[in-house]
Image (cartoon, grey):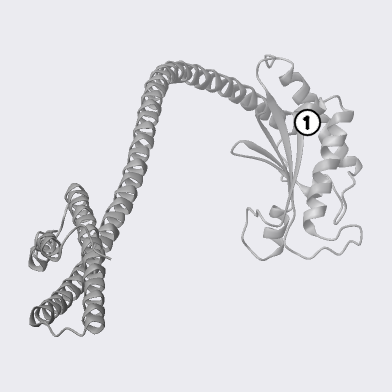
Amino acid sequence: MKSSRGPLGILALLLAVPAAGAFAADAVPAPATPTFDELQATIARMQQRLDRLGSATTERDAALRFLEQQVEQATGQIAGSGRTNESLRGETALLSDQVEDISRDRDRLNDEAGQQRTALERLQAQMAAIEAEAGHAAQRADRAEAATAAQATEIDRLREQNAAQKEQIDRLNGLLAAAEAQVDAQEETIAGLDDRLAAALAKKVEELEQYRSEFFGRLHQALGDRPGLRVVGDRFVFQSELLFASGSASLDPEGQRELRELATTLTDVVARIPPGVDWILRVDGHTDRQPIRDAAFRSNWELSAARAISVIQYLMQQGIPPEHLAAAGFGEYRPIDPGDDEIAYRRNRRIEFKLTEG
């Protein structure tokens, strides 16, 4: 079967395809660190070249098939006619050489196409990596933008809070200044009140001292100079033997008589004490340090307190108001004579009366 295109026309078509070196020169067009746009341009160019290589490969495959048909036809013609025409053999050899050249060109084109595909895949992988990195960068940018917005919101909130706190501090400072001024005024008032109170107390003490002196003076006149009675400072002292039997807290008749005279004198004196002067007649019981032998009391302290209570109970019976009476027991712990003989013991066994402010 003859083709409409002769062998020389097919060879001219094959020679029009670019040489392998022209493709190899552009096999690796990308720079060391290509940009995304450069990678896209390189991929487009390589895709065009691959298309051209595919077209050339198709044309050469068609030419190869045509030449193979021509060889087979020529061989059949030679075998059928028995001719040994030298021109036919030369043409057959030429066609065989052309077939081999075309085969080699096809192989080269296939190799170059494979290299171009490999380079294209590598560039596509790089572009995918760049796209992925661009996506990650965009996500990081979004997160950074969101974080910046959140920080700006927090800063605004802190500024508002700081302004509110400053306003509150100013208000508290104003309240503190007002309170300090009020305290200063109150302190001045208190100082004035303290001065007036001190003056009033001093006046009352002075008045009470006047009545106390009168009370002790008149009491001393009423009771006379007796060995068991004496005035010690601001106290009037009864020896316990004048009021109680040894170890007893019950007033004997002589002691009751002594206390009646004391109550009469006290009633006359306190009748003239102004109502505003608060006074107390304190009755203190004291003993010596000898151990108590009375089973009714467990200690000298209990005995001294019981004797003081017996005295104020009797004074109450004589009309002395109970709100102006007080009893205290000191036992042997406040002696007036540190001696260790009977004289010291007798002096320490005593009942003391002290007219003092309430």
Between 343 and 158, the one lying in front of the other is 158
Between 54 and 312, the one lying in front of the other is 54
Q: Mark 1 points at which residue?
A: 262
Residue type at mark 1 is Leu
Give coordinates of residue 46: x percent, y percent: 19, 56
Give coordinates of residue 53: x percent, y percent: 20, 60
Vertical position of residue 132 compared to residue 197: above or below: below
Residue at the spot 28% in from the left edge and 57% down from the top edge:
124
**Where the C terminus falls, by quadrant?**
top right
Between 157 and 323, the one lying in front of the other is 157
**Where the N terminus falls, by quadrant?**
bottom left
Q: Can residue 259 be seen at all in this image of the molecule?
A: yes
Specify few, some or many for label 1: CA neighbours under 10 Å numbering under 14, 14-19, or 20 or more.
many
Vertical position of residue 91 compared to residue 178: above or below: below
Residue at the spot 30% in from the left edge and 57% down from the top edge:
129
Left or right: residue 273 versus residue 11 is right
Give coordinates of residue 259: x percent, y percent: 82, 34
Secondary structure of the residue carrying numbered label 1? helix
Left or right: residue 11 versus residue 161 is left
Between 338 and 164, the one lying in front of the other is 164
